[in-house]
Amino acid sequence: MDFAILLNTASGASASGQGAALGSSGFMIVILLFFVVYMWMMSRREKKNRNEEQTMRDNLKVGDEVVTIGGILGKVVSVKDETVVLETGADRNKIRFTKAAIATNASANARAQADKEAKEAAKAKEKAAKKEGKKKD
């Protein structure tokens, strides 16, 4: 019966008792639509983060400073297909981890930050040169 009422209201036919049904069902449709869009956006963000983490793990190099998901800090000594050997502490203990256990690559983060700062400095220098060129004219 509710489906028939929904079809009647969607087709433009309205009766005195059916207006309230459209209001509540319309509200539910809007809420459902917002929920679907929200979930879609969250899944895209999660997929992007997963891809960034996988790229970081695939680009590990010997000598990188990394932090594991357990909080162990170490320097990468060797990299194989699915495992990484880290050297930790002053004792130079070597521990083997799976690549999935690497949470962050501090060396890559530092390189990325330095590259970003260099680009910003180059833009600022270029902007200053343009200002100087305009002042001379």
Image: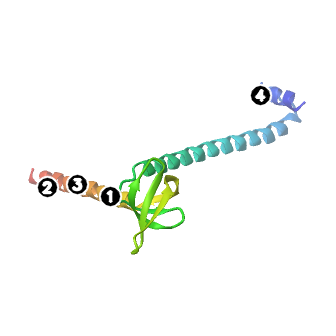
Q: Amino acid at mark 4?
A: Ala
Q: Amino acid at mark 2?
A: Glu
Q: Going from the N terminus, do you reach mark 1 or mark 4 first?
A: 4
Q: CA distance from mark 3 to mark 1?
A: 16 Å
Q: CA distance from mark 2 to mark 4?
A: 65 Å
* Residue drawn at 72 percent across, 42 percent down: 32
Q: Going from the N terminus, do you reach mark 2 or mark 1 first?
A: 1
Return the residue at label 4.
10
Q: Relative to residue 136, is residue 113 drawn left or right?
A: right
The label shown at residue 111 is 1
Colour approach in the figure? rainbow
Q: Are marks 3 and 2 in contact (CB under 8 Å)?
A: no
The label shown at residue 132 is 2
Q: Going from the N terminus, do you reach mark 4 or mark 3 first?
A: 4
Return the residue at label 3.
122
Q: Going from the N terminus, do you reach mark 3 or mark 1 first?
A: 1
Of circles 1 and 4, the one toward us is: 1
Q: Amino acid at mark 1?
A: Arg
